[in-house]
Amino acid sequence: MSTRRNALVGLAWLTPTLAFVGFFVLWPMVHLVWLSFTSTSLLGGGQWIGLENYRTAFGDPKFWAAFKFTLLYTVVITPLLMGLGLALALLVSPNTPLRRLTRSVVFLPVVIGLASSSLLWFWLFDQQVGLFNQLLVDLGVIDAPVVWFRRAETGLAAVIISVTWKVVGFGMILIMAGIQSIGTDLFEAARIDGASRSLQVRRIILPLAARSLVMATVISVIGSMLAFDQFYLMTGGGPRGKTFTSVYWIYQSGFVRFDLGYSAALSVILMVVIMAMTVLQLRLQSRRRR
Amino acid sequence: MSVATLALPPKPLARQARGWLMAAICIAIITLMLMPLVMSFLASFRPLAETSAVPPTYLPSALSLENYQKVANYQQGVWTYVRNSTVVAGLTIVLCLALSVPAGFALARFPVPGKEIWFVLILASMMIPYQALLVPIYLMFAKLGLTGNHFGLAILHTILQLPFSVYLMRNSFESVPKELEEAARVDGASTAFQLRRVFIPLALPGMVTVALFAFITSWNEFIGALILMNTESAFTVPIMLTGVVSGDFGSVDWGALQASVVVSMLPCLLVYLALQRYYVSGLLAGAVK
């Protein structure tokens, strides 16, 4: 059987996927860029307006507010997720039954939907019927139930608590895999040399698991920069539009205000930011391979 | 293993104390993480009169199915939405497998010209956040009649899941031993026959992982369904949730909210508990490529 024939057979197997990616990813991407130069409306119509949408975007205080709020969310939640993820990974990396169980339970919320977990916590945080508030009151942490979603700061805190509960297991698993890939002989040697656990963590685990930690960080940052569900369902962008994220603002511009052209321009900006981050991620990964 | 048999370290008592402390921490964490889930399950079985009690009680005084009966009749009935979500997730699984199995096979086993370029191209679509593509995709789907359509939403979910699926299938097919393929070839089997009889049985774990991730992604996906599913009868479960919380019942009906949240979580939890091994290995494969 000739190589030439094999090449053709292989190409035939590959064609459906290539066609799918071309039609549903690459073409929409080109179309998106084109749309961003038009005044296309969801109600129909629209014409070429050049860079007008981008000019509007960069002069739009709401765009900047949403972008800054997304950054704030990312900057606050990332260290929290990675710090807790690392602590949990250190705790659960030994393969004893109790630690395996802890691992599985911490990971459990990762598989449920962000919409489900957001609404679950929306209830827990409620000032009247919420059990989280009630628990804090009963424990004497607060005197009276807090109205979490009245202020942007407490609303953000509530979202961060709920998302941390939901995704902390993801970072934990990635970092744990990094720790577990370290050979046991290294720990044996350290123990025989009388190195304390904290010394082992600092001198063996952290340097050798650093890459998986960085990887988890980049994935988590990208996820946070694309936050939408949790804010849409828990704060609704409120109070007074203070908790709109970048994706929320894209949604709002395109599908609530019908300004698809403007929404497309915002999407292009977001896409460039995220692609830059992904390139960073891929570079870190390829360094890992070497 | 008793502590006394260990030559090292020199302080067995301190070591034992440390062991107990770690066990206590583990149990505390388990309790903390499970509490919201357990509370939500219990709250969903409260009698109607208790669902909006102020201040709330931690445990229901009696168990009842009233909240579930209520959501069963909510709008189109919760089972309509569960069925919609199941159909979309099922189509997503079929599309992901139908595309990624042949593509992975070709990339792993055939001397396709420009193979690396195609592979990178497929993976590169992972770099583009699908949230940014929703405007052109909405317009395209509107033209093709795919808005408010289960198949359309499944296509969107496949866009999300395809790069990971192709990557995983390529790895699965690459790990099949060369000797097996050669044996099949010597026997004069066609490539389709080889794929069916030799490769697919061996790549089955990979396919289970692809299907599992496709299911979880599709079942939970929110913003795409919010934009594309514009008729109530086509809503998926996450979109139904927005209706419950935005107060289609008047004010927020907490009991209905609990019951629908449980309905939305349960399939994912069950599938995960049944296929945990595949999930974790898939997750690591996806992140550490």
Image: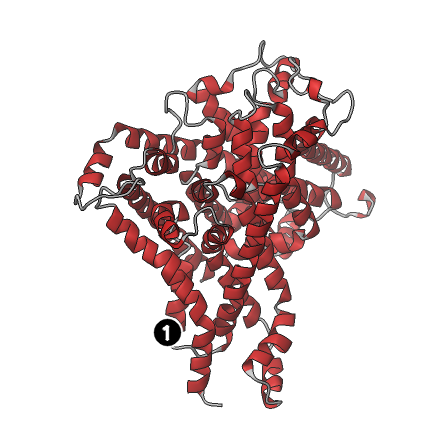
Disc 1: CA contacts within 10 A as few (<14), some (14-19) or many (>=20)? few
Q: Chain of mark 1?
A: B
Query: Residue A212 location in percent, x, y?
Result: 50, 50
Query: Residue B81 location in percent, x, y?
Result: 58, 41
Describe the element under mark 1 as helix, strand or loop: loop
Residue at which label 1 appears = B114
Query: Residue B102 location in percent, x, y?
Result: 51, 70
Mark 1: amino acid: Gly
> Quick check: B220 left or right of A103?
left
Which of the 4 quarters of the picture holds residue B70?
Answer: top right
Residue A256 seen: yes
Front-most of A20 and B275?
A20
Residue at 70% over, 18% down: B50
Query: Residue A245 location in percent, x, y?
Result: 38, 33
> Quick check: A262 left or right of B123?
left
Which of the 4 quarters of the picture holds residue B18?
Answer: top right
Residue at 49% over, 52% down: B157
Residue A114 seen: no
